[in-house]
Amino acid sequence: MHIVSGVVGPDVIVFPTKLMLMPALAIAALWALRGSFDTSTATRAASVLFVALAFSWLGDGAGFFFPFLDDELPAMLLCFGLAHLAYILLFLRFLPRRAVPRWTLGYVVWWVLMVAVLWPSLGTLAIAVALYGLVLGGTAVAATRGGAITTAGGAFFLASDTILALRLFLPDQTGLLAGPWVMLTYTIGQGLLAYGIVRLLREEPR
């Protein structure tokens, strides 16, 4: 509903439906995890997942939650940065199921290219965005430790942030569908991450 309304309207429901995305995902994850909190490890891991979703929610509505700021972008970057750090902690500390594959070196190439392309347009945000890019790539890499589902989720999340960065800093070179593509890849990425994490937690020995 959110993505369709962003393309064809009505515009009045675009922002409200955006603010419903992460709460809906959190409720779905909580429902799917019922009966899976018999160990302290599972409880802590689930808590970190909900922290990641909460910060993502704040990032989605940065302009609404932080109206006292002249520019919502720093708040959005901070909130999503904290969400990504929560995901990284989750996969490195609680849900490592396999080693990081060698192909993830491709994410290093992604970071170098993105910094090179965006740098002339970043101004005073250059260092912050470069560091933020490291965190984004870190989530994509860390997510590979959870399995194929979370690997795909991390890749889609990274794709969303990549499109968003191009849209924010190179607006003259993005198409009309940039916004919908940001949200489509974002919702798929978050959904796959949450689904993969829930599956891993439900497989935990209890």
Image (cartoon, rainbow, N blue to C red):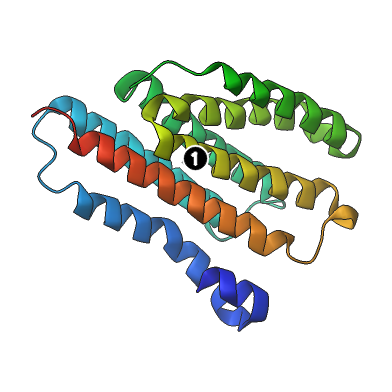
Q: Residue 179 appears at what percent x and percent y?
A: 69, 61
Say how many tags the image has.
1
Asked where in the image residue 36 lies, by quadrant, the reply is: top left
Q: In the figure, 101 relative to 136: above or below?
A: above
Q: In this view, does 143 lie above or below 9?
A: above
Residue 66, can we see it? Answer: no
User: Mark 1 Cα within 10 Å, few/some/many (few <14, many 20+)?
Assistant: many
For badge 1, the amino acid type reads Ala
Give the quarter of the image for residue 3. bottom right
Q: Nearer the viewer, residue 3 or 97?
A: 97
Q: Which of 58 and 8 is in front in this view?
A: 8
> In the rendered view of the protein, which quadrant contains the C terminus?
top left
Q: In this view, does 82 lie to the left or right of 77?
A: left
In this rendering, does residue 64 appear at all?
yes
Q: Identify the residue at horizontal 54%, vertical 31% (top origin).
A: 140
Is 7 left or right of 157, judged from the image as shown?
right
Against 205, residue 55 (above or below) is: below
Q: In this view, does 37 lie to the left or right of 7?
A: left
Residue 46 drawn above or below residue 10? above
| Residue matched to label 1 | 152
Residue drawn at point x = 54 percent, y = 78 percent: 13
Q: Position of residue 123 (x, y in %)?
A: 87, 35
Residue 136, image x and y in percent? 59, 32
Q: Seen in the image, is 84 located left or right of residue 130? A: left
Residue at x 73%, y 23% (from the top left corner)? 109
Residue 141 image position (x, y, % from top left): 53, 25
- Residue, x 46% and y 44% (percent of image)? 55
Q: Nearer the viewer, residue 51 or 91?
A: 91
At mark 1, the secondary structure is helix
